Image (cartoon, rainbow, N blue to C red):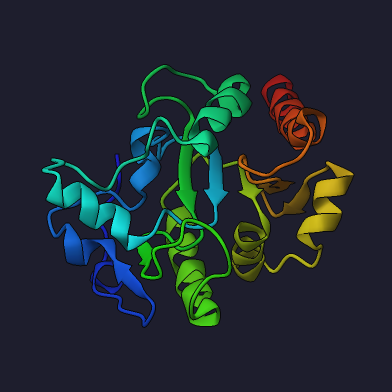
């Protein structure tokens, strides 16, 4: 279950974005994707770039959606992620699956109506993301691994854990970068237009690393 969120998260405002709690003041989740993978006691954090544009939330609200801050099952990203992350799961329900799925920008939804591309006001947005990620790491007592799905997620994690390896180098090496008790993996975003072999390679490394920890 999502821990209580501090006011500095829900009250944060930044030009170019709408904080989801402005639109959904009763929302308790930090990540809109927690209804897919939402285990805060899990061992693996899956980190993407951002949730979506604010227009998506507004459209869902206008359509009468009872919980508009949620993942979209039909989205290619989520369909592929279900398959890629399947070997890492330890339970069936989102709350017991062993995985937490979030994004570098957490509750910030971009206002440019885009679902991809360069982030508005990127420096300040990433600064907020780093602070949120520190909060998340501190509230996942069993966390062992972070899978960064894309460069933005890697930069956010690097800012918190002071990693010196680039996302591209870590991704191509398909080996984790260690930071204290945490293993950080660089993976492609699930929607990236690459071969299945390239997409799968980092996830195999995650599975192997987790298997070694289980056996230890």
Q: Is residue 38 above or below residue 125?
A: above
**Picture quadrant of residue 147:** top right
Dividing the picture into quarters, in which one does residue 112 lie? bottom left
Q: Give x and y (percent) for residue 138.
A: 45, 56
Give the mark count.
0
Q: Residue at x 48, y 54 (%)?
A: 103
Is residue 4 visible in the rendered image? The answer is no
Left or right for 110, reference 166: left
Residue 33 x %, y %: 39, 42
What is the quadrant of the C terminus in the image? top right
Evaluate whether residue 138 shows in this view: yes
| 153 to 11, vertically: above or below | above
- Residue 166 at what x, y percent from top left? 80, 63
Quadrant including the N terminus:
top left
Where residue 178 appears, x then y in whole percent?
Answer: 75, 51
> Residue at left 57%, top 21%?
86
Q: Residue at x 46, y 48 (%)?
A: 102
Toward which corner of the image does residue 91 lie, by quadrant?
top left
Observer-nearest of 182 and 83:
83
Front in this rendered view, residue 117 or 34: 117
Foreground pick, 207 / 55: 55
In this view, 52 is above or below 125:
above
**Outermost residue to the top:** 92
Q: Residue at x 45, y 25 (%)?
A: 97
Please give left or right for residue 24 compared with residue 112 in the image.
left
Residue 112 drawn above or below residue 79:
below
């Amino acid at each position: 279950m999502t821990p209580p969120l501090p006011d500095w998260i829900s009250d944060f405002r930044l030009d170019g974005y709408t904080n989801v709690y402005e639109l959904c003041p009763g929302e308790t989740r930090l990540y809109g994707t927690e209804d897919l993978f939402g285990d805060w006691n899990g061992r693996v954090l899956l980190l993407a770039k951002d949730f979506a544009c604010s227009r998506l939330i507004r459209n869902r609200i206008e359509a009468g959606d009872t919980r508009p801050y949620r993942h979209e099952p039909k989205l290619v990203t989520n369909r592929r992620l279900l398959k890629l992350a399947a070997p890492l799961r330890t339970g069936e329900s989102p709350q017991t699956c062993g995985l937490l799925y979030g994004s570098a920008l957490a509750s910030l939804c971009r206002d440019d109506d885009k679902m991809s591309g360069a982030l508005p006001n990127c420096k300040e947005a990433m600064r907020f993301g780093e602070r949120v990620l520190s909060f998340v790491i501190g509230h996942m007592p069993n966390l062992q691994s972070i899978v960064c799905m894309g460069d933005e997620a890697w930069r956010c994690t690097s800012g918190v854990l002071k990693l010196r390896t680039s996302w591209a180098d870590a991704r191509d090496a398909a080996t984790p970068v260690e930071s204290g008790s945490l293993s950080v993996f660089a993976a492609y975003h699930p929607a990236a237009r690459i071969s299945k072999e390239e997409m799968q390679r980092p996830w195999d490394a995650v599975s192997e690393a987790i298997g070694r920890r289980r056996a230890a």
